[in-house]
Amino acid sequence: MAFKHWPVVRDVRFALKCGRYLRGARKRRPDLNWDEFHRIARHFKLDDMGSFPERGYLFQLASDLPENAQVIEIGSWMGASTCFIAAGLKGKEAKVFAVDKFQGLSTCGEDAAWYNRHFATLGSNSTLEIFRKNFSDLGLATRAETVISDSLAAARELSVKRGGIDFIFIDGDHSYAACKADILAWAPYVKRGGVIAFHDFGSRADGVTRAIFEETKTGRFAEIVGVAGTIIAFRM
Ligand SMILES: C[S@@+](CC[C@H](N)C(=O)[O-])C[C@H]1O[C@@H](n2cnc3c(N)ncnc32)[C@H](O)[C@@H]1O
């Protein structure tokens, strides 16, 4: 095991990095419940899908939504991003619809290899039970509903929600064609004034960056809400 993965070393690194992030976050947004963010971050100490600024930004975007907000996430994997979003929501009716087949779908070569390595370590070919356990361990289960489906099939299944969603987070298939198809399928679901955000903008996932750029140029999004790490958020 590499030195950085030793439990004590790992915990110290986590405490230092998270503490540094939280000091800045509390100054920037003293109105948000960063203790709740910290609780979720501690639970996902081993998570390698997002940085503190990215996880914090999702938490912030969710915290800024109106009461009982309705959220859709495309690509939930083990539920880390989903939990950070769910933790920021308020109101008994607030909900995140987590769309994923939970089998590491990808038409993007690098990602497929990465998922396969994870599945070999897990000894399973699904992340659904881990997703559910994370939500129940954190006491957030009532805030999430899984939609076990391919993204585009889910868009057809959830069609009654078109125009009624407060926030969509897209972090599914990172190929150009799939990201473009996700934007075309899901953008109409966001209500006017709502937010659509993407992970991996400007990252090694060139297709995601290209698809978002193209759609920005068509005027699909009203304005940029913000950027954190490789997350970019737009207002519709
Ligand atoms: C990068 S992971 C998501 C990570 C998660 N959002 C997080 O930050 O913790 C991408 C996920 O998208 C899912 N995915 C890829 N293509 C998809 C598709 N066409 N429909 C639904 N889910 C898809 C994969 O199964 C995988 O779980």
Image (cartoon, rainbow, N blue to C red):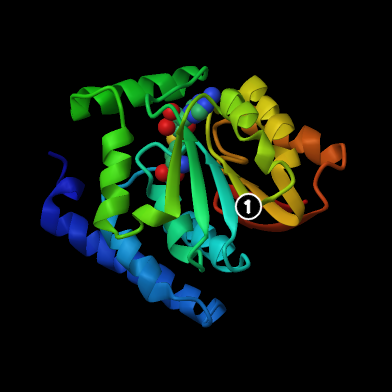
Q: Looking at the image, which residue is at 57% across and 51% down?
A: 71
Q: Position of residue 114 (x, y in %)?
A: 36, 25
Q: Amino acid at mark 1?
A: Phe
Task: Judge left or right: residue 189 versus residue 76.
Answer: right
Q: Looking at the image, which residue is at 76% across and 37% down?
A: 213
Task: Judge left or right: residue 35 versus residue 223.
Answer: left
Give 133 or 53, whichever is nearer the viewer.
133
The N terminus lies in quadrant: top left
Q: Position of residue 81 (x, y in %)?
A: 44, 49
Q: Looking at the image, which residue is at 59% across and 60% down?
A: 69
Give 119 or 21, whichever is nearer the viewer.
119
Q: Picture quarter containing residue 154? A: top right
Q: Position of residue 229 (x, y in %)?
A: 54, 52
Q: Which residue is most to the right?
A: 218
Q: Looking at the image, which residue is at 34% across and 61% down?
A: 40
Q: Is residue 221 above or below residue 180?
A: below
Task: Judge left or right: residue 12 versus residue 103.
Answer: left
Q: Position of residue 75 (x, y in %)?
A: 49, 35
Q: Is residue 26 above or below residue 60?
A: below
Residue 101 at least partly seen: yes
Q: Secondary structure at mark 1?
A: strand
| Residue to which mark 1 is pinned | 167
Q: Badge 1 local density, few (<14 within 10 Å), some, or many (20+)?
A: many
Q: Is residue 126 above or below residue 78?
A: above
Residue 20 at least partly seen: no
Q: Picture quarter containing residue 214? A: top right
